[in-house]
Amino acid sequence: MIQHRPSPRQRDLRGARRKGPRSGLLLASVAAAALLSPSLALAQDDDLAARVARLEALVLDQQKRIEAQDALLAQRAAGVAAPADVAESGIDPRWRFQSDASRPFANGEMAALRAGQATGQAGAPPQTAPAPAGAPPVEPPLLQARREQLAAIPEGIAVLTRPGKLTLDISTEYTRSSANRLVFRGIEIVPGVQIGVIEANEADRDTGVATIAAKYGLTSRMEVELRAPYVWRNDTITTVQQRDEAVTRTIDLSGDGIGDVEGAIRYQINGGERGRPIFIGGLRVKSNTGEGPFDIPRDEFGVASRLATGSGFWGVETSLSFLYPSDPAVIFGSLSYFAHLPKDINKTEGEVLIGEVDPGDAIGMSIGFGFSLNPKFSFSLGYKHSYIRPTTSELNDLTEKSDDLQVGALQFGMSYLLTDRFSLNGNFEFGVTEDAPDMRFVLRLPIIF
């Protein structure tokens, strides 16, 4: 009997049938994978090459952005500002001052940063146009400071006017002063028993001033100013004397006219590099255009017929102020010395011959800060103090000296930005010493041309 033995291939096929459909699917999958493996390997190679190309492009783009940022920082450190910072900042250049790169982002830079974050890339800084060959050297430009931080700072300390620009400052102010004094002229035998005259004085003084000031920027570091005030005054003095009976006397005086015209020049000393304060030096000259106390007529008792509108003396003031940006505030302060020039009056009032009069010089200082609540409204708080030296007068060839004065006041300022050219500023001063006025209020409207 002849037995037929199956071949190896037939044995494999019979084994596959016995193992069932799972073994058949496994064999089919292995065969398909063997056929598709070259195509999958080729696709993976293409995908890896594309990813490497994209990564290389991203690295190059980031390198370019880093180089641009390094160039911008180097320019700021060297004192050269990018035009995009000035053009896109949206801030009036009138309120600029020198500093280093430690300032908040300008509006254009912030928009670029936000755009870069939206695309998942670092924000590109504004590009700087290269200076043309043969161009004159550029002055160190003034860094943009936020106007809302500086608008409420008291006048005379704020930053300089932009070169070639004119600022017309219209202001009005009101000052209120009152004083009460009790004087006893006589002798006191025992406590409570007095022989003599008791005199009580009450003085109420109201002063209003309307001023037109013009400021012009000569360079990025220098400005000039001219101020012309018109003064109105009214004093009411009530005197009560107690002798055998009470005697009351009231004097009501007033006066108005042009005040003392002033001229000033201010110069920015440094640029505030490396986070240092910005210093501004000033020189102010006060004329005697107003009617002085020795220019008005008096009666036979020496009582003036009206009030003076000026000091009657020339004066010169030197000052040094500083601004120190410290986000979100700007710290400010000043130190000044005002010197009156002596004058020979050579005039007889009643029985008194008035010779040379030297009004007391004044040493002043102030300190405070400005803070912005939003892009339009800001306020400032500060304190100022003046020490006024005694006035020396020659009366009938005898030298008389008055008392020195200590004048201190708390300052509070507010500012609201109406438009890019107009703003409304209000400043209050409240006296805290005996010699200081009770209250002073200044309302200003700066207009930029």
Image (cartoon, grey):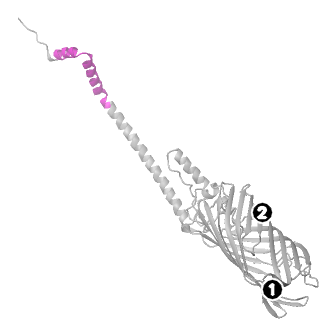
- What crowding class fits label 1: few (fewer than 14 Cα within 10 Å), some (14-19), or many (20 or more)? few
Between disc 1 and disc 2, the foreground one is 1
Q: Which mark is residue 299?
A: none
Residue 152 to residue 317: above or below: above
Report the magenta stretch's main SS.
helix
Q: Is residue 343 left or right of residue 37?
A: right
Q: Residue furthest top?
A: 1
Q: CA distance from mark 1 to mark 2?
A: 51 Å
In the rendered image, residue 279, in percent from the top left (x then y), is placed at 62, 72
In the rendered image, residue 162, in percent from the top left (x then y), is placed at 69, 65
Residue 419 to residue 13: above or below: below
Which residue does the image show at 20% across and 14% down from the upper left? 18
Is residue 22 located in the magenta-colored stretch of the structure? Answer: yes
Please report the bounds of the magenta region as a residue range.
9-38
Q: Is residue 126 left or right of residue 251?
A: left
Is residue 429 located in the magenta-colored stretch of the structure? Answer: no
Q: Secondary structure at mark 2?
A: strand
Residue that numbered label 1 is attached to? 188
Q: In the image, what residue type sits under mark 1?
A: Glu
Q: Which mark is residue 443?
A: 2
In the rendered image, residue 73, in percent from the top left (x then y), is placed at 52, 61
Q: In the image, what residue type sits under mark 2?
A: Leu
Which residue does the image show at 43% across and 49% down from the upper left? 59
- Where residue 24 sits, quadrant-wise, is top left
Q: Is residue 283 left or right of residue 400?
A: left
Mark 1 or 2, nearer chain start: 1
Q: Is residue 282 visible?
A: yes
Q: Secondary structure at mark 1?
A: strand
In the rendered image, residue 338, in percent from the top left (x then y), is placed at 72, 79
